[in-house]
Amino acid sequence: MGDGEQTGRILILGGTSEAMKLAAVLAAQLQYPALLSLAGRTKKPVLPAIPSRIGGFGGVEGLAYWLEMHQTPMVIDATHPFAARMSWNAAEACARLRIPRLTFTRRPWEPEPSDRWTSVRDIDAAVDALGAEPRRVFLTVGRLSLPAFARAPWHSYVARSIDEPQTNEMPPRCRVLLARPPFSQADEKALMQAEGFDVICTKNSGGDATEAKLLAARELGLRVIMVERPQAPQGDVLFDLPAVMHWIRDHLPAP
């Protein structure tokens, strides 16, 4: 679509199921024209029912310029909870232009008393938490985080990914499972038993689509190394679609 067609549209920063759900609702409500922006990290993304763009903006300056040029009335940040740089760029650009901004995200997972979680601040700390004894590790940390595990080559890994990692992204002794969520608890339990995992390493992305691995780990008594979310910018944060639609109605400038 051309730049002229983008003018005056709500900008959704997406790539998540939350972004797709919001896009589907807005597509049916012509009074809320919107555009979904995807970072381009997934090779074959599922495209929404509204106009979309793929690629970055060029940092804060590039995003602020884009927002101003396209007369963007508001920004909905529905990026992945670990896409911290994009969220901070959006916060600064929107503050500079005084454009309303909302974060639409998933509630983080919380451990139950019976869970065997080790919470860590980042991927490097997750590698350290695996320890010196060789382990059979299930990695669900995303393709871009796999290289960090190369410095712990005494473990054996199975990494699940939507896209095939490049050879230089893979730690040694690592096999890839290509799959797209959602996953069932029964299937996750069967996978964990068949592979003989000792520990699961994952990110606290939240949501229902990939929670089944945690439920299966609880059932099997497996240890989970949980990478907690990076610090997010201050601002309005909502977790459910009806509340987001209410926020949009309240914050759109008067015609």
Image (tube, rainbow, N blue to C red):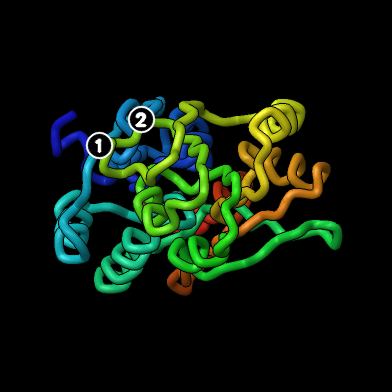
- Up the image or down, 108 lies above or below 49; here it is below
The quadrant the N terminus occupies is top left
Observer able to see residue 35: no
Task: Say whether residue 245 is left or right of residue 117.
Answer: left
Helix, strand or loop for disc 1: strand
Helix, strand or loop for disc 2: loop
Task: Say whether residue 122 is left or right of residue 129.
Answer: left
- Up the image or down, 217 lies above or below 21; here it is below
Q: Callout 2: 10 Å neighbours few (<14), some, many (20+)?
A: some
Which residue occupies the foreground of this view, 170 or 251?
Answer: 170
Q: Label 2 belongs to which residue?
A: 164
Spot occupied by residue 119 in the image (x, y as percentages of width and height): 62, 67
Picture residue at 25% right of the left edge, 73% below the top = 96
Which numbered disc, 1 or 2, marks the residue that appears first in the sequence?
1
Spot occupied by residue 189 in the image (x, y as percentages of width and height): 74, 33
Picture residue at 76% right of the left edge, 43% below the top = 215
Q: Label 1 belongs to which residue?
A: 53
Measure how far apart labels 1 and 2 are at the Cα level: 23 Å
Which residue occupies the foreground of this view, 29 or 57?
Answer: 57
Image quadrant of residue 227?
Answer: bottom right
Picture residue at 21% right of the left edge, 49% below the top = 56
Spot occupied by residue 166 in the image (x, y as percentages of width and height): 28, 36
Please report contact status of discs 1 and 2: CB closer than 8 Å, yes or no.
Answer: no
- Up the image or down, 135 lies above or below 19; here it is below
Q: Which mark is residue 15?
A: none
Q: Callout 1: 10 Å neighbours few (<14), some, many (20+)?
A: some
Picture residue at 85% right of the left edge, 58% below the top = 114
Spot occupied by residue 129 in the image (x, y as percentages of width and height): 57, 65
* Amino acid bearing label 2: Glu
Observer able to see residue 21: yes
* Amino acid bearing label 1: Arg
Q: Nearer the viewer, mark 1 or mark 2?
A: 2
